[in-house]
Structures are given as C-alpha cells and as structure tokens.
Image (cartoon, grey):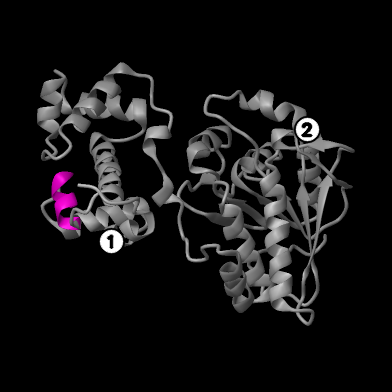
Amino acid sequence: MAKEVSVDEEPGVSALRVGVLAYPGCFASEVFGIPDLLTMASHVAGPERPGYEVSVLSPRRRVAASGGVVLAVSPLREVDVLVVPGFELLPGLDMDAKLAPLAPEVAAIRAHAATGRAVVSLCVGAFLLAEAGLLDGRRATTAWLFADELARRCPDAEVHPDRLVVTDRGVTTAAAFSAMYDFALELIRRHSGAGVARTTARVALVDDARVSQAPYVDARLLPRPGNAFSHRVMRRLDQHLADRYDLAGLSDAFHVSTRTLLRRFADETGLSPLEYLQSSRVRRARHLLETTDRTVAAVAATVGYRDPATFAALFARHTGRRPRDYRAAFRRGGGT
C-alpha cells in the first residue's frame, strides 16, 4: 500500500502532488482557491523548499462548475492528496438526486482512498466522501448549516459541527466555504513549515488563528422542527428570554408534567428547554455585541445573567470566543 500523506506530517522534502477533483456543479472558487494559496506558499518558501504540484482532475472530459464556468481538467492520475470541493446546496434539497449523477466521482474518491493516500473534502464535499463510505467510524465536519444532515446520512460518523478542520486517519474534512483556507494553511504548515504558512496567510490576508466555525453559526438559518408543541415552547422561552429558567412554571403553562415536557421537547428537537434557552440567549447576545455599544455586563443582564463571568463562560462555550473577543471580530457598527 502506498504511503499515506496526512496533514499531520512534518515538513516534507519533495513536491507534494495535490489533485482537486472537479465535477459538474462544484464551486469553481473551491477548485481554484487551494491551488492559488499553495502557489503563494511556493513563492514564499522559495525554490530551495519543497513546493506543490497542483492539478485539476476529473473522470470526465468536460466539467461545468457552478455558474456554468467550464473548467479545463486533466484525467485522473495518482496524487498524494485528493481534494474534493463543495457544491451548491440548499436546505431541503434532495441529496440522493444531487449525488446520484456523481457516481464516477464517488468511485474515483473511493479508489484514491484505497491506495492509502490522503483525501480532503471542502464544505459539503463531505457528502461525497460519505457516499464513498470514507466517513464511517471517523470524526468529520462540514458546513455548520448541513452538519445535522451529514450526521443523519452517515450515522456511523462522529460529526463535529463546530470544528473548522478535522483529520482522522488520512481523511480530512473542512467546514463551510472559506475553511478551505484553514485546511490549506494547515497543509502548508505541515509540508513547508509554520513560518511559510504564517507568511502566506499575511500575504493573502487570510486569518490563520481561527479555531472554530461556532462564532459564525446563525441558528435562525437552521431547519427547525415541524412540531407545534416544541414551537410553542420555543416561542414562550424567546418571549421570556431574560426571565429565570423555571421548568415547573413552563410545564404548568402548557398543562403537562415536567417529565412530559422534557420528553416531548427532546423528542422533537434533540434538546432540553434549558439548552434551547441558552442558545437563544447567546444568539441575542451576539446580536447585541455586534450592533450596540452596551457593556458586556449590560448585555449579560439583558439576556438573563446577573453574573457577567457566568455569561462569558456560557458564551465562550457556544461560540468559541469570549464576549469581548467576539465583539472585536464581528462588530458591525454603532448603535444603541
């Protein structure tokens, strides 16, 4: 079996062969984003350091990417790392219908993985890896908006919706869209060294310090359960966001026992009412931190926390950043 190339390796001594798998409807920017950043890294490293041989590959003779952009492709060949870009995906899209025409690409992914060489997916390209059977028994991530769908389609995978890049035994999955740069920087770091990766990030104006996609999650865009009971409970919790959490009072409001409320809400949402309330409070706090000048303590009080330290810990657990750090990164302008 050929030697596995992983992003966990130390800087290499020879050019790394990277192939990007193009297919109908793939995001053209994800096809070219990786090669472009690797090209910059080669220039930063200089001719004395190992570089990258990058090619755009396909089992097809002609590929039209997203927006009808026609790509110049080369036939499949042996590479050290095969990168699978994402594609346009809307909530509710029939995934089976989307993936069925991509059987040649799924077969190519499976064949490459069988050689023991590294496979990487960008964004929802993870669904192609899942179709090829590569995520079973592995940790993985994908775009946060579709992480639940990936977990449903691939129940044997351990899906981490907050992670930017996950590597598990030669299979790497990256989060939504721009996480392709987080992956590319990690690849550069392992193949060319930390200094080259850091300088490449500066040249390209790419953030090389991100650790999670959690700060970008907007729960309003996530599919919500279609059950009237949980919707009513959620609405009441949202209407009383700053009130003390009172499970007994909440149960009385819906004329059910606490046990019944917890069971029905969990069956319909996969959450407890308290977990939903906490996420809703964090969502409101994010909006206030982005759009107002209120102090962190004032924001905490607005969403029901008298102790700013307790609020900050909860906020960091949900977003991966402390409130002040979140405001510095996502501030959108003044307000009240």
* Magenta extent: 296-304
Badge 1 amino acid: Arg
Q: Residue at x 62, y 27 (%)?
A: 95
Spot the residue most to the bottom. 48
Left or right of 17, for residue 95? left
Residue 103 — which label?
2
Q: Nearer the viewer, residue 302 or 116?
A: 302
Asked if residue 84 shows in the view, the reply is no
| Residue located beneath label 1 in the image | 324
Which badge, 2 or 1, comes first in the chain's sequence? 2
Q: Residue at x 65, y 42 (%)?
A: 86
Q: Nearer the viewer, residue 160 or 267?
A: 160
CA gap between label 2 and label 1 equals 47 Å
Left or right of 97, for residue 214? left
Left or right of 200, for residue 26? right
Quadrant hosting residue 225: top left
Q: Nearer the viewer, residue 49 or 133?
A: 49
- Residue 44 highlighted magenta (yes or no): no
Q: Main secondary structure of the magenta part?
A: helix
Quadrant hosting residue 262: top left
Q: Position of residue 51 (x, y in %)?
A: 77, 71
Asked if residue 308 shows in the view, the reply is yes
Q: Position of residue 298 (x, y in %)?
A: 14, 52
Badge 2 amino acid: Ala
Q: Residues within 10 Å of mark 2 (few under 14, many from 20)?
A: few
Q: Residue at x 20, y 31 (%)?
A: 237
Residue 2 — which label?
none
Quadrant hosting residue 6: bottom right
Q: Nearer the viewer, residue 55 or 171?
A: 55
Q: Secondary structure at mark 1?
A: helix
